[in-house]
Amino acid sequence: MSKKPKNLGDSASLREPGKHDDKSTLVPKLRFPEFRAAEGWEQKEIGEVFQVTRGDVLSMTLVRDEKTEAMPYPVYSSQTKNNGLSGYYSDYLFEDAITWTTDGANAGDVNYRSGKFYCTNVCGVLLNSKGFANPCIAALINAVSRKYVSYVGNPKLMNGVMSKIPIPFPSIAEQQKIAECLSSVDELMAAQARKVDALKTHKKGLMQQLFPREGETQPRLRFPEFQNAGEWEVKPLGTAAKNLDNRRRPITSSDREAGDVPYYGASGIVDYVEGCIFDEDLLCVSEDGANLVARTYPIAFPISGKTWVNNHAHVLRFTNPCTQKFVEVYLNSIKLDDFITGMAQPKLNKAMLDKIPIPYPEVPEQQRIADCLSSLDDLIAAQTQKLEALKTHKQGLMQQLFPSPEEVT
């Protein structure tokens, strides 16, 4: 059944900030030239300015992944991937509004939603037809909203609590100027994120071509000098590397002494400690954890120099550095479902690790593939650093553009 779009609301109770002289005001450290002589920002509760409501229940079976003429309206939920976008639907509930996640791990995440959209019942919605629903105010609320999340049981930030959150409001004109500035930075970040995603997609596709498919002994794509080099030899991983698991040693958090030696677990560095177990170039492979299935982080990663590894990652030594890199890249490119045991707690034990079949070309071809993918990794890392720099720049910019509540004048 088609739902009617909700009223944007313009009741008399939605008072415009800046019209009450008895309120305390705040002044940001950085202002655009045309507002430097303007009055301070007036602090008001969100419920005084916005109509506070929330979305409706919607079965995700009715939502489509791709936007079409019949399904043109974005649907937002409590997820953080894709900026909360779950897909597209045939109807909308709101237009040009601010949403926040009311329940779950992402409770308190606030976003401005431009245009017509639908949001589910785990999204609260702030409505104002006078222009106060914009990226500037969304960022102001997002800067403080998590302080008001209740973490007793399932994290929550309900409508009543959101209504009482005080934030400083500039004039509409200054809001729009700040919103334009932040939107420009967001566009740069989005473009940079697309570049990083494109490189990752390219790498994934390249690896699928550079390594043989399951049951095959030659890849679909080979460098010119190896076109006639013949089939790759498939051998179990246990025959190519020495397992050093017996040297691992976990340290409880209460017993750790802070230092400068990386302490590794299933997905990388956990902490920095005193002392070391290893002092050479080695390969770690996750032994247990959800990451074995989810692949949020690489399951195989190199360690070098003085290091400490707990019992959540296997430690392997290879006689040839390029073989180590080759195996690292290969393990991160394939699914290991047939070698992982346990449902509640996925585990890749030593016996199963040793059985993983690895297709090996001759060392020169290993080196060529490793060099190619390492260069691509370096490019991805450089572009990711640019994205992180933009995020840091935006955070610093907001700290200057938004007044601190402690600086009430």
Image (cartoon, grey):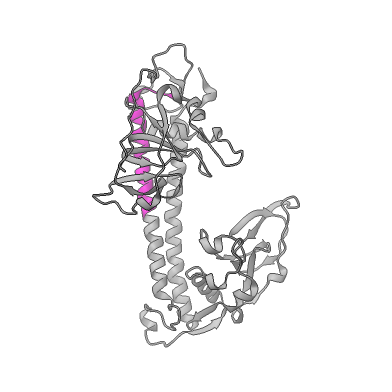
Query: Of 280 and 1, which appears nearest the observer?
Result: 1
Query: Of 56 and 114, which appears nearest the observer?
Result: 56
Q: Is residue 272 left or right of residue 175?
A: right
- Residue at image location 64% in from the left, 69% down from the top: 315
Magenta stretch: includes residue 215: no
Give the magenta range: 169-194
Q: Is residue 239 above or below residue 41?
A: below
- Residue 362, how many percent across, how many down? 48, 84
- Residue 381, how many percent across, how many down? 46, 58
Write down the quadrant of residue 128 in the picture: top left
Q: Main secondary structure of the magenta part?
A: helix
Magenta stretch: includes residue 175: yes
> Does residue 298 appear anywhere in the picture?
no
Instruction: Report the quarter where the N terminus lies.
Output: top left
Residue at the front extreme, as displayed: 1
Write down the quadrant of residue 155 in the picture: top right
